[in-house]
Image (cartoon, coloured by chain):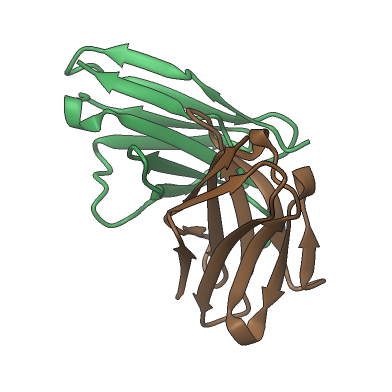
Amino acid sequence: AQSVTQLGSHVSVSEGALVLLRCNYSSSVPPYLFWYVQYPNQGLQLLLKYTSAATLVKGINGFEAEFKKSETSFHLTKPSAHMSDAAEYFCAVSGDTDKLIFGTGTRLQVFP
Amino acid sequence: GAVVSQHPSWVICKSGTSVKIECRSLDFQATTMFWYRQFPKQSLMLMATSNEGSKATYEQGVEKDKFLINHASLTLSTLTVTSAHPEDSSFYICSARATHSNQPQHFGDGTRLSIL
């Protein structure tokens, strides 16, 4: 079975500051891990995915995430926040089933 | 690539009406499609998983007679909310995935359903 915990339902940063969104997972099998972004009244857009290749995964819009097995973490980062990054971010895991298990989401606010 | 189109984007209808939502994969063949429901400011709740040509697998607590899912081709799945009531009002999102489970799910833009 798999589960995902996203620490912090809200994160606020200033424009240009580092973005760090935390995700910890639990999985009984090697996991596949994903980060998705959701803008208001829209579906989810894939930012990046980890599928057991490189542990540092680069995604779209300048985001990246690092898979750390020892810490069971897959935190999402971006060196410099932009106003357009304000959205809801979901971490998700899949593994021994077809299903994606989502975290509860983190709302990112970016202040000028 | 990997575009999923969901239609309609917004539906308002009277209680007792049945509503059909379509989910299409435009540039890939989706062997598996998923239907989610999302309540305001909450995460996505998986309702059912459908594989082309077979019956959908519903999650516990989801009424299969209320939420009819058809996955008749590798590019189209439909969700029909039968005899909809105000408590069925929600944001419904579909996703589609090609082949293996390590491939990401690609999501439609969702359908906002409001039952009066």
The picture places residue B68, in percent across and down from the top left corner, at 34, 35
Seen in the image, is A94 located left or right of residue A59?
A: left
Q: Residue at x 39, y 24 (%)?
A: B112
> Residue B88 occupies which quadrant of the picture?
top left
In the picture shown, does residue A17 fall above or below B76? below
x then y, percent, for residue B96: 59, 42
* Observer able to see residue B101: no
Please identify the residue farthest to the bottom as the structure is shown: A70
Residue A63 in view, yes or no: yes
Q: Give the image location of residue B79, x and y in percent.
A: 40, 32
Question: Residue at horizontal 82%, vertical 71%?
Answer: A54
Kindly indicate which chain is depicted in green in the rendered structure. B
Foreground: B75 or A76?
A76
Number of numbered tags placed on the structure image: 0
Q: Which residue lies at the image location 44% right of the left edge and 42% below the top edge?
A: B35
Q: In the visual, does B51 lie left or right of A31?
A: left
What is the quadrant of the C terminus of chain A in the image?
Answer: top right
Question: Residue A35's quadrant in the figure?
Answer: bottom right
Residue B53 x, y percent position in the rendering: 53, 43
A104 lies above or below B52: below
Q: Indicate left or right for A86 with A3 as reference.
A: right
Chain with brown colouring: A
* Location of the N terminus of chain A (image quadrant): bottom left
